[in-house]
Amino acid sequence: MDDEDGYFGERVAATYDNPSAREFHPDTLAPMADLLADLAGGGRALELGVGTGRVALPLAARGVPVHGIDLSRAMVARMRDKPGGDAIGVTIGDFATTRVDGTFSVAYLVFNTIMNLTTQAAQVACFRNVADHLAPGGRFVIETMVPELRKLPAGQNLVPFHASPTRWSFDIYDVATQEMSSNYVEVVDGRGSYWSVPFRYVWPAELDLMAQLAGMRLRDRWEAWRGEPFTGESGAHVSVWEKPGH
């Protein structure tokens, strides 16, 4: 991938916001923004992978100063075009290593975005980078999937998640390396296109160890943003780690 915006350049940014999708519905965003505002406690929030402002804008509307880090200028440009978008400070760069001035009460990384860091070393670096940005007592929140390996029969490495007469989408897993990719095939007017995005899936316990290496400890883990209990059947989790302090 040689696009300076990575895998989320203009082609993706142009269609990323989908008001009909569950992720953009107010009933989805409200509990996210409410929890993050509560964790901010009147302080600043840092969003890793701020994108088009899906979460940053409703959080800022609750009175929380938000700063974002993102590699994609095309995604950030979409946020700038929205009401309130100019009020969100943004630093362009890799959120695993990019530094921002000042400290924050809460940092967050949502919608599986931790998996956009495709090596364990980069994921560990992200936790350390966040810890360096947090004030004492600050919290780091991650929302991500639980790897769907239970859906893989013996000898299979592919999990489909969408099928229609013109579009097919599927994840490919490598259980030896924890590498995976989401793949999209679409046929329009008889012409086919293919798009693939690489990820590295990561387990909750592995994230806890990364937090420990960065000097943070697990405070809470839920299945979703309203505090639903996390169980062995949960397909996702919202985890909160805390930096020691007052």
Image (cartoon, rainbow, N blue to C red):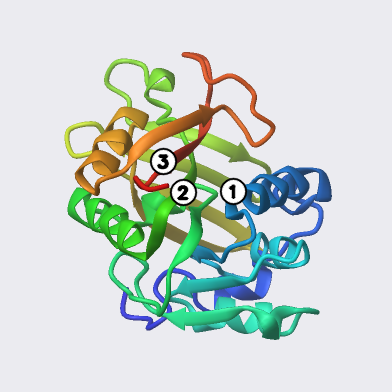
Label 2: how many residues lie within 10 Å, few (<14), some (14-19) or many (20+)?
many
Which sits earlier in the primary sequence, circle 3 or circle 1? 1
Where residue 188 appears, as percent x and y from the top left, is 66, 63
Quadrant in which residue 63 is drawn: bottom right
Q: Secondary structure at mark 1?
A: helix
What is the three-letter code of the residue carrying label 2?
Arg
Residue 158 is drawn in which quadrant? top left
CA gap between label 3 and label 1 equals: 11 Å
- Taking the image as shown, residue 72 lies to the left or right of residue 51, namely left
Per the image, the residue denoted by label 3 is 241
Labels 3 and 2 touching (C-beta < 8 A): yes
Crowding near pointer 1: few (<14 within 10 Å), some, many (20+)?
A: many
In the rendered structure, the answer to whether residue 123 lies left or right of residue 158 reads: left
**Marker disc for residue 139:** 2
Label 3: which secondary element: strand
Q: Secondary structure at mark 2?
A: strand
Give the side of residue 235 with respect to residue 55, left or right: left
3D distance between C-alphas at marks 3 and 2: 6 Å
Compare residues 239 and 65 and report the one nearer the observer: 65
Q: Earlier in the sequence, mark 2 or mark 1?
A: 1
**Numbered mark located on residue 39 in the image:** 1
- Asked whether the beta carbons under mark 2 and mark 1 sit within 8 Å of each other, the answer is yes
